Amino acid sequence: MTPSPRNFPGDGVPWWRNAVVYEVYVRSFADSDGDGDGDLAGVRSRLGHLRDLGVDALWLTPFYVSPLADGGYDVADYRDVDPRFGSLRDFDDLVAAAHDHGLRVIVDIVPNHTSDRHPWFREAAKSPPGSPARDRYIFRPGKPDGSPPNDWPSTFGGPAWTRLDPSDDASEWYLHLYAPEQPDLNWRNPEVRAEFETILRFWLDRGVDGFRIDVAAGLFKDANLADLGERRRHVVDGPIYSRPEVHEVYRDWRRVLDAYPGERMAIGEVWTDSAAELARYLRPDELHQVFQFDLQLAPWSAPAFHKVVTAALREIEPTGSAPTWVLSSHDAVRHLTRYEQRGGVPGIGYARARAALLFLLALPGSAYLYQGEELGLPQADVPDDARQDPVFLRTGGVEKGRDGCRVPIPWSGRTSPYGFGPEGTRPWLPMPEGWASLTVEAQRQDPGSMLSFYRQALRLRRELTPGLPGTLEWTEVTETTLAFRRDHLVCVVNFDENPVRLPEGRPVLTTIPLYGDLLPGNAAAWLTT
């Protein structure tokens, strides 16, 4: 299939280096048919919102055939669209429409594990131990005492092993770093590697501009499956993540991507213990980008933000790549709520979220936004009986899980479904009462709304940052204030409650009005010199 024509003027700089990418959680973005699930046709119908917002690309979370045991990250067929989300024709239409709007399209790829409904795993379950079918996954006998093969925990709670036949004490166990419905693949098997290169080409041939790689550091495990013992689960040199062999895979994938026109790219979800380890994935013949999650994890603190940015820039610069910043995602409590919870003052999270956005957009590199943050959505309080996240289910409710950040987007109206779907739609997760003032419709014409602020900030970023160096100069670093310069652009953030004096320059955007030349607390400003 020939990719859709692109309407992307080139300036000699790879588009992904300075892009603003918008994460679309497909199930919660827009529902075109009223079944309660967002879908690809719904995304297509709302592309004007993304164009007007001013982003460069959208990242689609998994829309493949899936039982949805983990929100689509349990894939049963990597080459088709789940009927709940549409069809391959809907996908092709969406890509073509996005390109017509000047938007690139990134899709999720899930290589660490499949669904237990995938044909490969169904075949493995019917095959004897040691068979080629089982070698595509990680099957092992248990220990003599009947316990799992090792002490690895599942990220979603409980052990990372499940006995294939719970009624048979001699049955083998299979590895799943996440839910039992997500068996881990054996990436030491050449058939697995060949299959995923074919999957990449399938979607590249349909015109996608890139891939977000789920659990990118987890493909290879220690061949001996050594116990963790007292070691931390995510240690860089441990038996589970960032094994050296994983880099061979991404060198192969880079060759696949480079063979296609249009600057196709890949960004990895990589959790590591250091910026230096993160940078290994960014070597010139590997991934184009990896997420810098430390800013998402950082508290509202000048020293914390300074430490994260300084470490990332120091380690990434030698690779020739650029950092990728993120504040929220489908896996984390929304940053507005995080800042509110740690602020102690009602409404302070809203002010801090605006300030954090200016900080993020002024940094060198690209920025990934999560749907709904442009509306100032807080983490929704989902009733326990409506929660679907396996984190909640597998921990017996001890951990609330991620449903609160996945509640559907409010588009219009006064009551649920707030334009998410046709009147009478019952969204797959309940939408809170009191969101009428947060809808796109309500905020679109309000110059003081979060949506208007995001649009203004993104417009100014496009005007002010082209041609700026990929480095920055810190001009003020204190316990309460950060300021940095990139050529003519200066960004100042006041993390304190008390006002601070701005440096010389012309203010072009502030999160709240200035007091003369004083920047109020929990605020940020851009200046030009």
Image (spheres, rainbow, N blue to C red):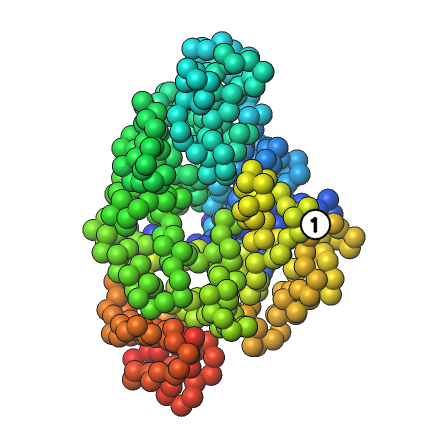
Residue extending furthest toward the right: 424
Residue extending furthest toward the left: 318
Residue at (53% x, 37% y) in the render: 73
Residue at (45% x, 22% y) in the render: 147
- Label 1 crowd (10 A; few <14 / some 14-19 / many >=20): many
Relative horizontal placement of residue 19, taking residue 388 as reference (left or right): left
- Foreground pick, 155 / 456: 155
Q: Secondary structure at mark 1?
A: loop
Q: Evaluate whether residue 351 shows in this view.
A: yes
The residue pinned by badge 1 equals 427
Quadrant the C terminus occupies = bottom left
Q: Which image quadrant for residue 243?
A: top left
Q: Which image quadrant for residue 435?
A: bottom right
Residue at (37% x, 43% y) in the render: 270
Q: Which image quadrant for residue 230?
A: top left
Residue 108 is situated, as x and y percent measured from the top left of the image, at 48, 41
- Foreground pick, 335 / 342: 342
Residue at (57% x, 77% y) in the render: 447
Residue 330 is situated, as x and y percent measured from the top left of the image, at 52, 50
In the displayed structure, 278 sits above or below 118; it is below
Residue 410 is situated, as x and y percent measured from the top left of the image, at 65, 60
Residue 105 is situated, as x and y percent measured from the top left of the image, at 49, 47
Residue extending furthest toward the front: 145
Relative horizontal placement of residue 384, taking residue 425 as reference (left or right): left
In the displayed structure, 87 sits above or below 446; it is above
- Foreground pick, 108 / 492: 492
- Amino acid type, mark 1: Pro
Q: Evaluate whether residue 42 shows in this view.
A: no
